[in-house]
Image: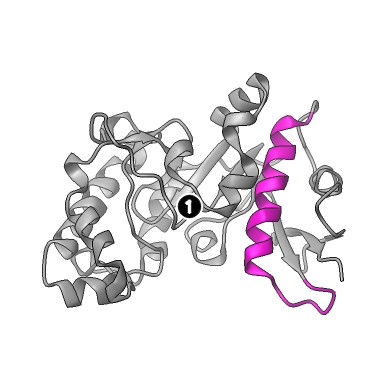
C-alpha cells in the first residue's frame, strides 16, 4: 500500500541543522536532477524583484517573509518532512503519537507530494519552504509545475497491478501523478448536498491516514479503506466505484448535519 499526502502551507521552520542534501532524499536517482532545477528556479525568483516574486508564487504582500525564506533555502536548516509539515492534515495524522509499528509503516508507505521536491518520504530532511503547485517558475519554462513533474514521477513511483494507492492529495498535486496500473482510492469529504468541504477534507484525510497506519491488517482493497474511514469524528461514509475504466474508487465522508 502507498499513501499519498499533500504538503501543507503551514510549516515548522527548523531552528538548527544541516541544510538539505538532495542526494540523500528518496528517489534521488529519478528525481534528483529535477529537484536541483526546481530549487534553483525558486531561489532565482525569490531573490529577484519582490513584486514579481510575489506574483509568481501567488502570495500577498503580507507574506513577503516567505519570499525571503525561499531565497535562502540552499543554506537553511533542514529536518524530517514529517516534522516540517504542520497543517490540519498532519495535526490529525499526529505522527509523533503513533505507536512504534505504525510509525515504521509510515516511513515505508507514506509519501508527501511537493511542488519543490516532487515527493518526499516522512524522514527525508527538508527546509521549510513556500511553493504551491499552482505557482509559476519562469526558469522551468513549463506549462505548470504539475505537468513539469509528471514524467519524472511516472518513472519513479511504484505502479503495479494489485497494489493499492490511497490518494489523500488535493487536486493540483493529484494532477502531477496518477497510477495507471495500481488500484487508486481517493478520499473526499462533502456535505449531504454534495458540496466539498476543504477544511473538513484535510482533517478527514489525516484521520484516515492514521487509521490506515494503525490497522492490524494492511488495507488491500477499496472496501478496506472505506471501513477504516468509519468511526468517531467522521460522518457517513460512502464507497463509489470508478465511473470509467482505470478511474479511481472514491471514499466519500458525508458531514453530519
Which residue does the image show at 67% across and 52% down from the upper left?
A: 205
Q: Residue furthest left?
A: 48
For label 1, count other residues whose C-alpha is less than 10 Å away and answer few (under 14), some (14-19) or many (20+). Answer: many
- Asked if residue 116 shows in the view, the reply is yes
Which residue does the image show at 57% across and 46% down from the upper left?
A: 90
153 vs 111, left or right, is left
- Asked if residue 164 shows in the view, the reply is no
Which residue does the image show at 18% across and 53% down from the upper left?
A: 40
Q: Is the residue 61 above or below the residue 223 in the image?
A: below
Q: Secondary structure at mark 1?
A: loop
Q: Quadrant of residue 236?
A: bottom right
Which residue does the image show at 69% across and 39% down from the upper left?
A: 210
Name the dominant secondary structure of the magenta segment: helix
Q: Position of residue 247 (x, y in %)?
A: 70, 62
Q: Is the residue 243 above or below the residue 107 in the image?
A: below
Q: Position of residue 58 (x, y in %)?
A: 34, 73
Q: Nearer the viewer, residue 191 or 26?
A: 191
Q: Residue furthest top?
A: 100
Q: Quadrant of residue 214?
A: top right
163 vs 123, left or right, is right
Q: Nearer the viewer, residue 159 or 172?
A: 172
Q: Nearer the viewer, residue 223 or 83?
A: 83
Residue 74 covered by magenta stretch: no
Residue 198 covered by magenta stretch: yes
Q: Which residue is mark 1?
A: 7
Q: Position of residue 165 (x, y in %)?
A: 65, 45
The magenta region covers 191-215
15 vs 120, left or right, is left
Amino acid at each position: 500500500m502507498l499513501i499519498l499526502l499533500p504538503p501543507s502551507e503551514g510549516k515548522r521552520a527548523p531552528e538548527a541543522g544541516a541544510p538539505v542534501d538532495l542526494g540523500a532524499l528518496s528517489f534521488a536517482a529519478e528525481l534528483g536532477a529535477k529537484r536541483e532545477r526546481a530549487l534553483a528556479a525558486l531561489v532565482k525568483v525569490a531573490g529577484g524583484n519582490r513584486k514579481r516574486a510575489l506574483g509568481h508564487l501567488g502570495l500577498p504582500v503580507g507574506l513577503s517573509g516567505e519570499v525571503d525564506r525561499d531565497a535562502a533555502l540552499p543554506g537553511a536548516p533542514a529536518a524530517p518532512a514529517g516534522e516540517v509539515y504542520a497543517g490540519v492534515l498532519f495535526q490529525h495524522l499526529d505522527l509523533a503519537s503513533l505507536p512504534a509499528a505504525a510509525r515504521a509503516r509510515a516511513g515505508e508507505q507514506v509519501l508527501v507530494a511537493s511542488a519543490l521536491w516532487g515527493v518526499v518520504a516522512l524522514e527525508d530532511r527538508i527546509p521549510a519552504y513556500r511553493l504551491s503547485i499552482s505557482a509559476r517558475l519562469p526558469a522551468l519554462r513549463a506549462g505548470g509545475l504539475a505537468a513539469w513533474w509528471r514524467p519524472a514521477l511516472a518513472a519513479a513511483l511504484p505502479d503495479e497491478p494489485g497494489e493499492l494507492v490511497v490518494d489523500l492529495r488535493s487536486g493540483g498535486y493529484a494532477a502531477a501523478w496518477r497510477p495507471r496500473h495500481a488500484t487508486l482510492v481517493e478520499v473526499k469529504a462533502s456535505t449531504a448536498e454534495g458540496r466539498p468541504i476543504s477544511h473538513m477534507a484535510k482533517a478527514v484525510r489525516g484521520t484516515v491516514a492514521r487509521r490506515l497506519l494503525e490497522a492490524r491488517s494492511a488495507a488491500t482493497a477499496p472496501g478496506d479503506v472505506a471501513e477504516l474511514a468509519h468511526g468517531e469524528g467522521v460522518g457517513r461514509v460512502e464507497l463509489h466505484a470508478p465511473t470509467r475504466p482505470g478511474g479511481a474508487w472514491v471514499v466519500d465522508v458525508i458531514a453530519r448535519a
